[in-house]
């Protein structure tokens, strides 16, 4: 037997040698058995070697041999008897070997025995055992939710592809992939299922996206009402509006805008109006412009198409008489010259046309209209043109216009403000000798600012304003000069100056009040930073210094003009409005010249408000209208009241001005005042003893009484 074993081993047949040992049960020497076991191992017969080692009682070597030979069943059985702690490891290794061998289904149970959940799931997925995989993932989820989600998603996609949508939805939800489930239903056209899941699991924005896609599908099929319903459900009003706009269904578009986007209704009307205008549908375009409260755009549309009558109609109906007059003036400009003047004369709008031309800076046109149809307004146009030229720093031209307007003082003040003493004196000597002292005073102010007190004193004396020089010395603390000057030129003031000097000397920490100084606002050449006194706007102070109301008004206007130059329009407006305002008690009735200058200032306040302070425009207009009434400019006041829709005041002013046609025009707009106009006109006719007009009005008793007289 031993010789047979030896021959088998030397012949490379260790298995035969092992069979001999197993067949002939004897007590073989250990060397023989080791030799057989080693030969089996060397020949790669690990499983047989493992069994042989196990017979020899060498469990560890047997286990190693089993593993090398992938005899995992025998290895696991041996481990259960001899090495229980290694059973789990061996089960996992067994599963790994089965996976490598592409036997996924068999590997599942071994991974489960090894507690390798993820490997078991992968094996189940590889074996397409979807139900088993789902059970395994459920087990994994209990301990590691995040780890389970990718597996749920893979299973869901399988059922998705298999069109088992209910099961796919369950796994998508378990995976936290509700969006994919909704997309699955959407792609399959299962809208109800998609909506149900969306409302349960999606945010509002995500639901919105879903409904948008559905609406697009319905829109493509021409089902606009159904698409609108979906879009409004998710509050996508803008998309619904855009859908109707794209389809050219403008009535539905306006309906939705009015219901849900009132802030855009105007823009929508304007958009449609523009389209209709381009298509030549002007009447329809007008309707949308009016609905957008942009009737001026409708007016422009008609004027652009040379339909002036229509433009005037729209302007008058929606903007009132003032607006229609503006359109008429534009028409006159288009016609030009005599034809334009004839048109405005025909419409009775020459005066308004002049105003609008001035407002537009069209002074030559304003002059032409005034010379042709209303010569009394020519000086006013020259004056306003002069003020405009002064703003533009075209001083020589401004001087010419001031002279034509018979306002030389304005030209003098302009040059004073520029410290152009030569031209100021030239104009004063030639056109207004009474203003020569004003030029000298202005020069003196500059000398004071430059600390040239001697020169200033001489100038004040030449201007016959010694009190100004005295104030100058007191204000600058030159008490010795003040005492000297008072003694020489104002002896009646000497005691007063002496007391002030003593008080100043005895008080260190507090200065005694000093009289206002005329030097308070002198400016450097070309500067336009100080008010147009031009030294400081305090009307009461100007009067106190002996200039009178007219000088105070001019000073205030120059102050306001300086504020304008500096862009301080609110101050400029306040300055203009201050003119003629009562400081204390009643204001004396101004002269005609003073009133004319006040009216120019107030008109400037209105123009500035319209251009730079529109939120205060109505208040400014009403304030100016009130002031115009105080100087008996009732017709101008009525025009302003009419412009801000103060119909009662406008009617009252027109009645006082005996402008009956204008009063009736306002009454046509505001019928409540027709009785007022008729009553006043009847009273006027009685006073005028005009029975013919009274008969026309139906006042037969009064007419007969006048005829009897």
Image (tube, rainbow, N blue to C red):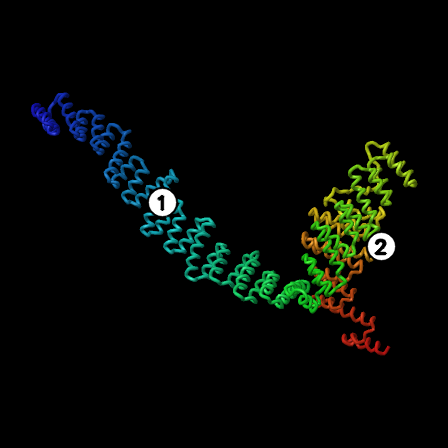
Give the side of residue 315 with respect to residue 593, left or right: left
Q: Mark 1 or mark 2: which comes first in sequence?
A: 1
Pointer 2: what residue?
588
Pointer 1: what residue?
153
In depth, the one of 11 and 124 nearer the eye is 11
Percent from the top left, x then y, of residue 672? 72, 67
Q: How would you rate the neighbour count of disc 2 (Cα within 10 Å): few for under 14, some for 14-19, many for 20 or more?
A: few
Which residue is found at the position 18% from the left and 31% from the top? 47
Percent from the top left, x then y, of residue 108? 28, 39
Q: Is residue 649 above or below residue 500?
A: below
Question: Mark 1, mark 2: which one is toward the viewer?
Answer: 2
For residue 170, say whether it is visible.
Answer: yes
Give the side of residue 96 with respect to residue 703, left or right: left
In depth, the one of 463 and 321 nearer the eye is 463
Which residue is found at the position 80% from the left and 70% from the top? 684
Q: How would you rate the neighbour count of disc 1 (Cα within 10 Å): few for under 14, some for 14-19, many for 20 or more?
A: many
Cα–Cα span, label 1 and label 2? 96 Å
Quadrant that contains the N terminus? top left
Residue 470, numbered label: none
Quarter of the image holding residue 347? bottom right
Give the side of residue 207 with respect to residue 649, left or right: left
Quadrant that contains the C terminus? bottom right
Q: Secondary structure at mark 1?
A: helix
For residue 620, say whether it is visible.
Answer: no
Q: Secondary structure at mark 2?
A: loop
Give the side of residue 581 with respect to residue 26, left or right: right
């Amino acid at each position: 037997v031993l010789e047979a074993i030896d021959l088998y081993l030397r012949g490379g047949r260790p298995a035969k040698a092992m069979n001999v040992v197993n067949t002939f049960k004897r007590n073989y020497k250990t060397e023989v058995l080791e030799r057989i076991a080693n030969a089996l191992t060397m020949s790669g017969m690990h499983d047989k070697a493992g069994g042989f080692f196990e017979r020899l009682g060498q469990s560890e070597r047997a286990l190693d041999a089993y593993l090398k030979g992938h005899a995992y069943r025998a290895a696991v059985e041996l481990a259960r008897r001899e090495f229980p702690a290694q059973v789990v490891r061996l089960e996992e290794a067994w599963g790994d070997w089965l996976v490598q061998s592409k036997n996924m289904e068999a590997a599942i149970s071994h991974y489960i025995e090894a507690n390798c959940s993820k490997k078991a799931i992968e094996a189940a997925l590889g074996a397409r055992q979807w139900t088993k995989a789902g059970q395994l993932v459920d087990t994994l989820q209990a301990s590691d939710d995040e780890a389970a989600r990718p597996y749920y998603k893979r299973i869901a996609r399988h059922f998705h592809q298999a069109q088992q949508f209910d099961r796919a939805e369950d796994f998508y939800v378990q995976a936290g992939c509700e969006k994919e489930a909704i997309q699955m239903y959407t792609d399959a056209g299962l809208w109800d299922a998609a909506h149900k899941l969306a409302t349960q699991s999606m945010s509002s924005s995500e639901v919105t996206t879903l409904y948008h896609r559905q609406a697009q599908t319905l829109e493509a099929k021409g089902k606009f009402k159904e698409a609108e319903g979906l879009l409004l459900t998710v509050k996508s009003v803008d998309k619904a509006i855009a859908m109707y706009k794209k389809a050219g269904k403008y009535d539905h578009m306006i309906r939705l805008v009015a219901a849900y986007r009132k802030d855009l209704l105007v823009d929508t009307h304007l958009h449609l109006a523009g389209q209709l205008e381009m298509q030549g549908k002007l009447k329809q375009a007008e309707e949308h412009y009016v609905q957008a409260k942009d009737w001026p755009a409708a007016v422009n549309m008609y004027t652009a198409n040379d339909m002036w009558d229509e433009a005037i109609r729209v302007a008058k109906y929606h903007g009132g008489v003032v607006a229609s007059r503006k359109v008429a003036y534009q028409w006159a400009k288009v016609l030009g010259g005599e034809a334009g003047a004839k048109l405005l004369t025909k419409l009775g709008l020459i005066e308004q046309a002049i105003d609008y031309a001035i407002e537009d800076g069209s002074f030559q046109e304003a002059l032409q209209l005034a010379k042709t149809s209303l010569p009394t307004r020519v000086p006013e146009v020259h004056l306003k043109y002069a003020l405009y030229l002064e703003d533009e720093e075209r001083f020589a031209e401004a001087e010419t216009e001031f002279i034509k307007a018979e306002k030389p003082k304005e030209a003098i003040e302009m040059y004073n403000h520029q410290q152009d003493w030569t031209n100021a004196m030239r104009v004063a000597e030639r056109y207004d000798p009474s203003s020569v002292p004003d030029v000298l005073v202005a020069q003196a102010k500059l000398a004071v600012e430059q600390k040239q007190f001697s020169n200033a004193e001489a100038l004040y004396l030449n201007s016959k304003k010694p009190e100004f020089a005295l104030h100058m010395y007191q204000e600058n603390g030159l008490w010795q000069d003040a005492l000297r000057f008072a003694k020489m030129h104002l002896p009646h003031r000497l005691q007063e100056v002496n007391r002030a000097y003593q008080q100043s000397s005895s008080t260190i920490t507090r200065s005694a009040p000093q009289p206002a100084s005329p030097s308070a606002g002198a400016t450097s050449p070309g500067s336009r930073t100080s008010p147009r006194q031009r030294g400081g706007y305090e009307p009461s102070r100007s009067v106190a210094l002996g200039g009178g109301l007219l000088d105070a008004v001019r000073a205030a206007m120059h102050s306001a003009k300086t504020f304008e130059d500096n862009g301080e329009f609110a101050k400029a407006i306040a300055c203009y409005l201050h003119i003629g305002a009562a400081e204390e008690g009643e204001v004396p009735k101004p002269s005609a010249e003073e009133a004319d200058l006040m009216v120019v200032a107030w008109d400037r306040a209105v123009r500035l408000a319209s251009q730079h302070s529109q939120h205060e425009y109505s208040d400014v207009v009403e304030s100016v209208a009130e002031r115009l009434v105080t100087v008996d400019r009732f017709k101008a006041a009525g025009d302003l009241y009419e412009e801000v829709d103060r119909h009662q005041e406008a009617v009252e002013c027109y009645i006082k001005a005996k402008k009956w046609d204008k009063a009736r025009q306002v009454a046509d707009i505001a019928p409540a005042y027709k009785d007022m106009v008729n009553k006043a006109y009847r009273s006027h006719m009685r006073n005028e003893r005009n029975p013919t007009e009274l008969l026309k009005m139906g006042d037969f008793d009064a007419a007969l009484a006048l005829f009897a007289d």
